[in-house]
Amino acid sequence: MTSPNASESPALELRALRVEYDQLVAVKDVSLKIYPGMIFGLLGPNGAGKTSLMSCVAGLVEATYGEVLINGLSLHDQRAEALASLGFQPDVPPMAEGLTVYEFLELFASAYGLKPSIRAERIESLLALVKLTEHRSAYAQGLSRGMRQRLFLAKTMLPSPRLMILDEPASGLDPMSRRDLAELIKRLAREGVAVVISSHVLEELNGVCDSLAVMANGEVLDQGRIEEVRARLNPPPELELRFLEGVSEECERRVRGYFGARLQSLTALGEPAVGYRAQLHAEEGALGPERLATDLKGLITAGLSPTRFVAREANLQDIFLTLAERHAQGELHAQPRGGER
Amino acid sequence: MSGDLFRGDLFDSERREPWLRVLDNPILRAQLRAQLRKKRALGVIQIAGLLSSLIVFVTYSIAGLKAPEAWASAMHATSWLMFVFLYWKGGSYLMQAVSTERESGIFVFLRSSPLSALSVAFGYLVGGASRAYVAALTLALPWVIMGHLSGEGVGTMFAGLFYLALGALTFHSLTLLLALRGQGKLSGTLRFAFIFLYFISDTLSDVGVKTVAHLTPVPAFSALGLTLWGEQVSRGDVLLFGLSLSSFTYTLLIQGLSLCACLWIATRSIEREGQPVVNRSGGLLMWGVTSLLVMGVDLNPSALNQLQALNVSLGYVPGSLTLLLLSLLALTGLLVTSSPSLISFQRASAREARRHGRAPTTRLPWSVEGASLLPFCGLCVTAMCTLVASYLLLHGGYEALKVGLRGGVLSSMLSVSVTLFALAGVSEHASALRGRQSYNLTLWVRGLTILLLPLLLALGAHQLQLPSLVELCASLSPLYGVLYAFKALWGPVTTAVNPSELALFTFSSGYFALSLMVELAVSLWSFRGAYTMKLQLIKSLNATANPTQA
């Protein structure tokens, strides 16, 4: 992924964006900045306002107020120019009736104003990219869901957009296609495209996104680079442990005995239990290499035979769940941070 | 996945999205592809071809080549077929095409492309019914030949084809509007209504209702010496405020304006779902142009005399029914549209201000999208009064005034408009004072004003022995205008009115002036209250939006 340049202008900037549907406020004064080369995950439960926010950026829903700037162009004042540099893939890709796969792409190639002389070549190259060349003459409506997703991905890339918004892009894709999609997204980011992805399957975003925003009830609870958000959450250091002895009272007693007051909680891992998850009290260097080596030796000295000893960092799911829980408990309020890097 | 992801040479460097794409229109091309696929179009074309061949074969077998009357009948039958394909099937195809795309979601999705909404509307308008045009084209060549054999000039036949296609396009633009707003069921009714209009357009022209008749190609056909059905009737020119226009020109003008208006409304529907059908300035323009045309062509003194003579000969029934229907339409519109909307106006004002990076305005904006009804009604009333005054001046005033007063037309029209204005003001005021709870209140206000006061007039005037007072209160209701019109139309009316008879109108004129004053006073009071409340709301919005400035 490219490292963002401080002098670069954002590929997408939202300024106090608000989307209302009659009495419902779907997006509450959200401000974001997403820079070229970022892969930005938009997380949140159902009804958090993710789709409304993305639809608003894509020009499908009108903002109540606030501003959307796509590559520095105002969506309100320079709509056509702004939309020309945006690729949007909705969660359920619509298909035109009576058009073949090739004709479907040609429809959008023309709609985006691609030069007529280059359209055919561009379509063919993208069909090859999403592995649909063999289906070019098939009716688009007859494609499977996964194929439709791939076709729409090709449509999204048609105008070489500098900003891509993908709503649940992996739904309906087989594992191989998911892997290909993740690779493609990383490649797009390397080439300087800002990619915004929303997904309920958080595992899909792990290792793909470098930044995120967590939404709930139309508000952004936290946003920024993943490591920054993780640091702000300050999750307890956690170890995943498995022993040759399996799971027993004796084993648990020895683990507790070794960690002593450092141990915050010890819970069984898996169903049926195959090991333990040990949450330690936060302290400087709790998961540092030296401390980990000492702990491993200590457990062996305590008479245990570790077969798995892994220091676990908070992943996207942990971040999301922690933020959601804190928000539900009223500990956390939306923050109007502007996506600073 | 591998391949060429990004290219810098995809676009012309100087390219800007045009407001309308005609030839390189992706929707048009996609629709043509979908509609004219062999398996979809072949059947319709075969049927059209077979039917025209059959007509030619039968006519030739029976009458031979040199029988102008027989070929005229054949041409007449082919006209019918073209009409069926263009209007009936074409409307159906277009409706189906747009509905399918709406259901699939692709339609909404086109909004996220740089393609202009006008290009999208144009693409569907021309492409959606293309199968019907192709079927009609299959019939067109035999039709021209039949016309030639019946003694018509080839130029005349091609001109006829042009007007037939223009009429179809106008009709399809109306269908497109219904399709875009998801009113499929109404589309069938519209087709019936339009076909009915074709049948009665000759009659309408005869009685002076020329503008509506010119929505069809029938007057142009008649002027060309052709006919779609029935006997050929020769039509004279159309007089627009005394200016003579040929039927061709007036058809072009009416249908061109209708087409533009429908395309404009369709464009708005495509741009944003749920926004009002028209905005203020556009709505006023459409209303003004329609009023000018109707006043200039259909409501001039001679046409009104014609209408009045027809009305008298038919026992005043047509006039009464028309007036009643128009009034009911106005009342329905009033009930449906004058809901409290000051808050939405505030939102719209705040949105505009935020978009343009300035503080919300403290002036009342007259043309903010989605704003309240009040300024619109005010403008409507002003424009209507100006138009009526201009019309009276243009047509010599006195004669027209007599006809207008006698028919109750002016009183109904102005009463409905001013009451609309007043009630909208009350609604706004109540909305500003009580927010959402005011909806019930305003409904009651409307109900009382529209229904209860005339009821009092009918039931209580005699018992109270105060007819004038009750009548005065009743003047707040637009129903009074209707009742007055009824009275005027059902009562004995002589076609010639002497100036001395004007004394008969003194009471009603004074009464009408009084009702105007009452209603305007109510409006101004409501307006002032709403305006004060608006300023307070703007202050609070300003404080919320810009806490530092506040």
Image (cartoon, grey):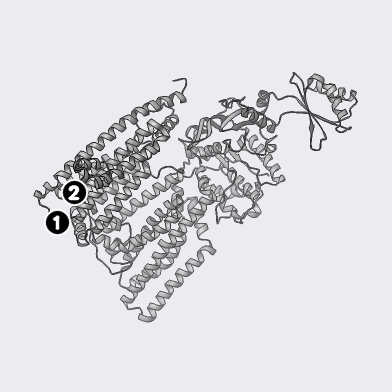
Please state which amino acid type lies under the numbered disc 1.
Answer: Thr
In the picture of the structure, the residue carrying the numbered disc 2 is B405
Residue B428, labelled with which disc? none
Residue depicted at x 73% and y 28%: A313
Q: Nearer the viewer, residue B72 or A314?
A: A314
Instruction: Output the chain of dot 1.
Output: B
- Give the side of residue B151 with respect to residue A80, left or right: left
Mark toward the start of the polypeptide (2 vs 1): 2
- Give the side of residue B491 with respect to residue A206, left or right: left
Where is residue A97 drawn, in percent x and y? 55, 55
Where is residue B307 drawn, in percent x and y? 21, 57
Instruction: Output the chain of dot 2.
Output: B
Residue depicted at x 65% and y 29%: A325
Against B190, residue A51 (above or below) is above
Residue at disc 1, secondary structure: loop
Q: Classify residue B421 by image quadrant.
A: top left
**Crowding near the residue tagged with mark 1, few <14, some 14–19, many ≥20 C-alpha atoms within 10 Å:** few
Where is residue B299 drawn, in percent x and y? 22, 52
In the picture of the structure, the residue carrying the numbered disc 1 is B494
